[in-house]
Amino acid sequence: MKRFGQVIQLKQGGAEEYCKYHAAVWPGVLKMITASHIMNYSIFRKDLVLFSYFEYVGDDFEGDMAAMAADSETQRWWDVVKPLMEPIETRTAGEFWADMEEIFHLD
């Protein structure tokens, strides 16, 4: 199992709509997240900053993420929520949500 922390910002005026969508995530999107071996997935908000945490329990992260990205329901979901967000400037090239470095963990 690998833990992931990621960060992104909401655009001005996008927070209410983003939260509305995440109060009722589409069932097909939830099914794809689970099928992609993602567990314990949470998104936290502070003002316009979003922090996500999830645990990946599969053995082919790149393959699972590619399958999720190819899913038509997930693509439609992203078409709705992505315009509400803007990546942080210090993200790595190619990232939308910026991966964070884990520096401490206690079970």
Image (cartoon, grey):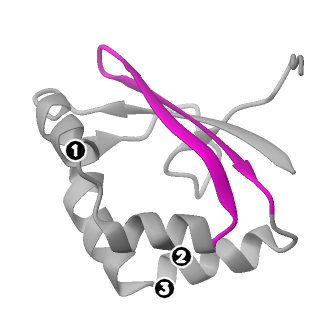
Label 3, on which residue? 70
Local crowd at mark 3 within 10 Å, few (<14), some, or many (≥20)?
Answer: few
Q: Please tell me the numbered disc located at residue 84.
A: 1
Estimate how packed mark 2 is, as few (under 14), some (14 to 19) or many (20 or more) residues with alpha carbons within 10 Å.
Answer: some
Secondary structure found at label 3: helix
Q: How many marks on residues?
A: 3
Question: For the residue labelled by badge 2, is the local secondary structure a helix, a strand or a loop?
Answer: helix
User: How much space separates mark 1 and mark 3, taking CA atoms?
Assistant: 21 Å
**Which span is picked out in magenta?**
36-57
Residue drawn at x 59%, y 83% as measured from the top left? 67
Q: Quick check: 3 above or below 28?
A: above
N-terminal of the pair, mark 1 or mark 3, is 3
Q: Is residue 62 left or right of residue 24?
A: right
Q: Is residue 30 above or below residue 75?
A: above
Q: Residues within 10 Å of mark 1 (few under 14, many from 20)?
A: some
Judging by the rendered image, the residue that carries numbered circle 2 is 68
Depth check, mark 2 against mark 1: the one in front is: 2
Residue kind at label 2, given as amino acid type: Met
Q: Amino acid under label 1? A: Leu
Q: Is residue 29 above or below residue 94?
A: below
Place of residue 63 in the rendered image (x, y in percent of width and height, measured from the top left): 73, 80
Q: Nearer the viewer, residue 32 or 89?
A: 32
Where is residue 92? Give x, y as percent.
65, 45
Q: Residue at x 80, y 59 (%)?
A: 57
CB-based contact (under 8 Å), mark 2 and mark 3: yes
Q: Earlier in the sequence, mark 2 or mark 1?
A: 2
Q: Quote the CA–CA distance across marks 2 and 1.
A: 20 Å
| Relative height, residue 105 to residue 6 (above, below) | above
Report, in whole angstroms, how far the alpha carbon at label 2 lies from the one at label 3: 5 Å
Q: Quadrant of residue 106?
A: top right
Image position of 80 (left or right of 6): left
